[in-house]
Amino acid sequence: MNRELITRATKCRDDIERLGKIIGKCSSAIEEIGHGADIKVIGSIRPDINLNDCCLDDGQEKLMQDMLVAILKNRLEDAEAELETLLPKEEE
């Protein structure tokens, strides 16, 4: 039981760290797009797509950041909640 608990808790911790890194990378990518970055979408089924000189206005950039951060924060909160259920409760 303890081994399973440690395994599940470790997985949750790793998920939380991974999601934190994703939030950072996505935020940086959105900021770059907002300043006129070129984008290359590497396809797995279709050929790669090059989007040159993509640019978002300030409102679009903020909207994309808010949407992305909200989605990832929800996933992060879910992972933290699951981790909390796995850890033993502290007695007061």
Image (tube, helix red, strand yellow):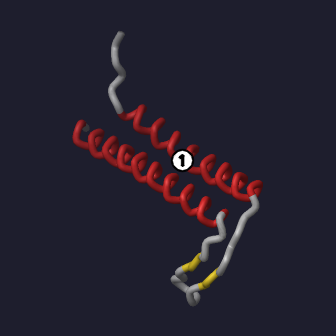
Kindly identify the residue that appears in the image at 64 percent across and 53 percent down: 65
Placement of 20 over or under 89, stated as above or below? below
Locate residue 29 relative to residue 34 in the image: left or right.
left
Q: Is residue 3 above or below residue 52?
A: above
- Left or right of residue 63: residue 80: left
In the picture provided, is 87 more to the left or to the right than 23?
A: left
Which quadrant holds the C terminus?
Answer: top left
Pick out the residue farthest to the front.
35
Question: Given the current orientation, which residue lies at the most extreme left position?
Answer: 3
Above or below: residue 77 compared with residue 57: above
Q: Nearer the viewer, residue 34 or 43?
A: 34
Callout 1: few (<14), some (14-19), or many (20+) C-alpha neighbours within 10 Å?
Answer: some
Seen as rendered, the residue at the extreme bottom is 47
User: Disc 1 residue type?
Assistant: Arg
- Residue sitting at 67 percent across and 52 percent down? 67
Disc 1 designates what residue? 75
| Direction from residue 83 to residue 44 in the image, left or right | right
Q: Secondary structure at mark 1?
A: helix
Q: Position of residue 21 (x, y in %)?
A: 44, 53
Q: Percent position (x, y) of residue 73?
A: 56, 44
Q: In this figure, what is the number of numbered marks?
A: 1
Q: Position of residue 31 (x, y in %)?
A: 61, 59
Most foreground residue, 82 or 4? 82
Quadrant, the N terminus: top left
* Residue at image point 60% right, 49% down: 69
In the displayed image of the protein, which residue is found farthest to the top? 92
